[in-house]
Image (spheres, coloured by chain):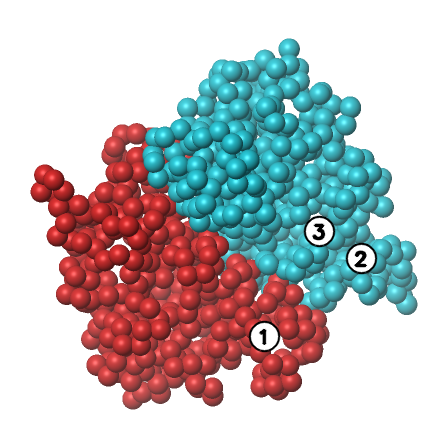
Chain colours: A cyan, B red
Amino acid sequence: MNRRGFLTAAGGIVAAGLAAPALAGTVARQGAPPDCEPFFATHQGGIATAAQTHCYIAALDITSGNRTAVASLLQRWTEASARLTLGLASGQDSGDAIGLSPARLTLTFGFGSGLFIKEDKDRFGLARQRPDAFVDLPHFPGDQLIEAQTGGDLLVQACADDPQVAFHAVRQLIQLAYETAELRWVQSGFIGRFKDKETPRNLMGFKDGTGNPLSSDKQAMDQHIWVGAEAPRWMQGGSYMVVRRSRMALEHWDRMNVGFQEQSFGRQKSSGAPLGKIHENDPLDLEAADKDGNPVIPENSHVRLATAANNDGVRILRRSYSYNDGVNFIAERWPPWHQGMEYDAGLIFVCYQRDPRTGFIAINDKLSRFDMMNQFVTVVGGGMFACPGGVAKGGYIGQALFESA
Amino acid sequence: MNRRGFLTAAGGIVAAGLAAPALAGTVARQGAPPDCEPFFATHQGGIATAAQTHCYIAALDITSGNRTAVASLLQRWTEASARLTLGLASGQDSGDAIGLSPARLTLTFGFGSGLFIKEDKDRFGLARQRPDAFVDLPHFPGDQLIEAQTGGDLLVQACADDPQVAFHAVRQLIQLAYETAELRWVQSGFIGRFKDKETPRNLMGFKDGTGNPLSSDKQAMDQHIWVGAEAPRWMQGGSYMVVRRSRMALEHWDRMNVGFQEQSFGRQKSSGAPLGKIHENDPLDLEAADKDGNPVIPENSHVRLATAANNDGVRILRRSYSYNDGVNFIAERWPPWHQGMEYDAGLIFVCYQRDPRTGFIAINDKLSRFDMMNQFVTVVGGGMFACPGGVAKGGYIGQALFESA
């Protein structure tokens, strides 16, 4: 069953101005398409969901000062998301996804700190609902954040196995926000079409995501990723999302020999195995030393600094995408090797965790100071967002927050 | 047979610094992978090739004044392209495509006018080889070309069914050019995963490419697309490529009702049929009038102005991709409907033709003045490039040009 079938059966966008028919009836008549991720669930999609090949992230600033208007937007977004993830048209649909399947579309919503307090104002009476764990990201050494690419009061992440489906979905949601919020920054990303179960490679050529908790491991997910009873009710079952737009100095990286790259990362490039090991999932041997007594996995390598064993056992769920936004003029300060047009490409680092204070912030506090990879990566944007728990049919995203006292 | 198999068998990138083994031996031992487009052929790939889902285009300026250095670059590019299109590593490969299939990668090379004459200089002694048909693009009404996104002496277009494969290929080629040429602009693009044989939709939601000559129609291709004996030998079997980075005012477009959109385009949105007809491939009836005697397909609609019947029978081969490069601040002058962050998204319009004077230039001379779509589209970059004929094994791209007197 493809989108065209749904649209035709539903009256579709062709009949502009006609109200979209009730969702339940359409789906009941036709059944959900096979490549469809459920929107109504205990947790929001796009977090534990197996990574799709494309994403489109949009951060918005709320322009209304009215709490009801924001709640109403979230209701419209919920209704539209339920349709879009089924491959159905939404409102006066822009039509560019007619004929495309749902492509496993997920829509993930997050709240920025500005929803609670902005410029010292509690605009919506929600400040008391801000969880203790939802602190601001500190400035990390080396950060070069561009304000126009950082922060935002609301975040929408669309992930799908088709770039047009992901953008289409966000575009319909943004249309619904015109009177309430405006775009602040957006970012598209991709992952190569690696085989199922194979850890994808980022643009540095290394596997990225090895060691993630498995979404099927309920105990690990509950312990490390999903927020529990420590938080206000609206955030329970949710997760804190950190986004970091990390530009890679690819021209620089490409001129390093592979041995140096592997020392920096602490893993082998081809297999993904830890240095000194054979297979990707072999455990890191942090004690292993070479014949001179030096650690096989260097002290300042990325994996040694980031691994749970060196971070009080804390794990985060990385779910990153590569990005590729053209070229611009850069003068590298060190080493003095090049000045000219360089790729604005790298990683949209995305991670989820139950508590960012012990998760990303603690881990990155070390990484930002010692990681050998830092000389090839500059973080220029992103932010932290509280993604509330999932929604049941009849409810809407963030309902428990907006209906709180 | 996937890329990992090839790389392992070939020694691969893991053994950095080892010379890549001879191509012929590797392929003979293992056979070419199934999703592989031939590099050595009568015509270059990526022109008549069925469109892949992603592209990455790079335009370069030549920094060397030495004809032999440029010819040598084209030799290295040819050798690398033959490997990359088979899914093999190239040189000190960046490794980000290990595990990915060739994904129908094609690499298409074009020459800008600067290869022949730049700032009144015949840098490489090639000016006399410039074909008469290879004129400069005129300024069209409404063009807002940004110099940094326009032109270039050399162009590489990578198309593949995987964005990571397309970028990977260009990245390896750019590494080979470090001493001879530098990046001027790049652009990535995509097409949604529409079903085979279905005309894809662009971001306006309309089918784009209906009425293209079929690549299987040798007579039409020879008549309209492939350059013949009228050109110098190096250009025979080639085609002239026009690239136009066309930003769409999507927020504006999305607020128009579908009836207005269809009048502007001259086709129905859902079916793609010409106004007044039923099926996408029904011929345009330019004579049809409504009960008041007005044309069913408006005089200033896109299809009426562009169709061969109104352009001396000339046809061009459109092979465009959508692009999506974030948002930036725009103040729309008309209608005064919005000022704020808008999508930098639209169409990388790409077309090929035997003679741009009677092809794109003649057609766009009318379109740029009368097309109702113009109010939603602004062209901000691109250029024209002469893509020489294909290469036989043992030869290199542009060889006949560089070996000419």
Q: Amino acid at mark 1?
A: Pro
**Which residue position holds label 3?**
A209
**Quadrant in the rendering for residue B291:** top left
Co-location on one chain, circles 2 and 1: no
Residue A270: % across, % down: 71, 66
Query: In front of the other: label 1 or label 3?
Result: 1
The span from disc 2 to disc 1 (Cα, nearest Å) is 28 Å
**Which residue position holds label 1?**
B33
Quadrant for the C terminus of chain B, please.
bottom left
Q: Amino acid at mark 2?
A: Asn
Query: In front of the other: label 2 or label 1?
Result: 1
Q: Which mark is residue A281?
A: 2
A160 displayed left or right of B366: right
Residue at 55% x, 15% y: name it.
A124
Q: Amino acid at mark 3?
A: Gly
Q: Chain of mark 3?
A: A
Towards the viewer: A74 or B347: A74
Quadrant for the N terminus of chain B, please.
bottom right
Q: Is residue B155 visible?
A: yes
Q: Residue furthest front?
A: A29
The span from disc 3 to disc 2 (Cα, nearest Å) is 11 Å
Density class for disc 2 (Cα within 10 Å; few <14, some 14-19, many ≥20) is few
Residue B37 versus residue B270 in the image, above or below: below
Q: Residue furthest left?
A: B293
Residue at 87% x, 56% y: name it.
A285
Residue B383: % across, % down: 31, 61
